[in-house]
Image (spheres, rainbow, N blue to C red):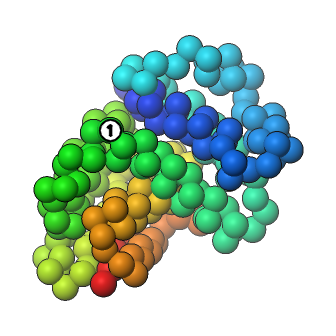
Amino acid sequence: MTIPMVRGYVLVQSLSFIESSYFDAQARRRIMDAVPSEVMKALPDLKPHQWYPRDTLIALQRAVAGSKDTEREIYDVLVAYGVHVCQEATNTFLRILLRLLTPGLFAKKIPDFWRRDHQGSGHFEVDVQRANEGVIKLRLVGAGGFDHIAIPSIGFVTHVLKGMGKSDVRMTQKGWSLATPAPNEVDYEILWA
């Protein structure tokens, strides 16, 4: 069985979020204290384009989720985390691409973006039949065991659509909750004006 892997830049951006002004100094310390020591030892040597075990990212996402108390607060911090990771991507490889894509074309590229950054963590399925009406459906399949990944994905996608100039962007999901932080399938619906 292959070990699920993630690109280093996602880990680097995860650390950047933890160290950002989103959290006060005390919260940052609590988050980093929640990261297992073996993960902490690996963090200084991260290289953005290398592959790392997905468990490293899971540990960081669990620590971020653990910084809040209620399901709503955890959801909100994970969405903000997803936006933060996306901001780096849209400042680099996506910036030019976004000028050319419609929301429907962007949605069709999501499976490619996922494969570029994740190995062994499932795949995205896309339904753009109603994209001209401002509705796209996504499904993340086969990501069981990947704690909390469902919610940062919302931050990533909504940030891109807002960057395209879409207003009133809303994205809902079915599958993730605190009781089921790592479902095998997550269904999303994206709406915008």
Q: Position of residue 72 (x, y in %)?
A: 67, 71
**Residue 15 image-quadrant placement:** top right
Asked whether the viewer can see residue 177, the reply is yes
Tell me: residue 81, above or below residue 187.
Answer: above
Q: Nearer the viewer, residue 112 or 22?
A: 22
Asked whether the viewer can see residue 5, the reply is no
Q: Position of residue 11 (x, y in %)?
A: 52, 33
On the picture, is 73 further left or further right than 97?
Answer: right
Q: Which residue is mark 1?
A: 92
On the picture, is 88 further left or further right than 109?
Answer: right
Badge 1 element: loop
Residue under the image location 79 percent in, 63 percent down = 69
On the picture, is 133 further left or further right than 154?
Answer: left
Q: Position of residue 30 (x, y in %)?
A: 82, 41
Q: Nearer the viewer, residue 175 or 130?
A: 130
Q: Position of residue 93 (x, y in %)?
A: 27, 39
Which image quarter holds the N terminus? top left
Mark 1: few, some, or many residues within 10 Å (few <14, many ≥20)? Answer: few
Tell me: residue 64, above or below residue 70.
Answer: above
Residue under the image location 32 percent in, 38 percent down = 92
**Residue 159 image-quadrant placement:** bottom left
Q: Total marks drawn? A: 1
Residue under the image location 65 percent in, 24 percent down = 39
Tell me: residue 105, above or below residue 38.
Answer: below
Which image quarter holds the C terminus? bottom left
On the picture, is 16 further left or further right than 186?
Answer: right
Q: Nearer the viewer, residue 17 or 108?
A: 17
The amino acid beneath tag 1 is: Thr
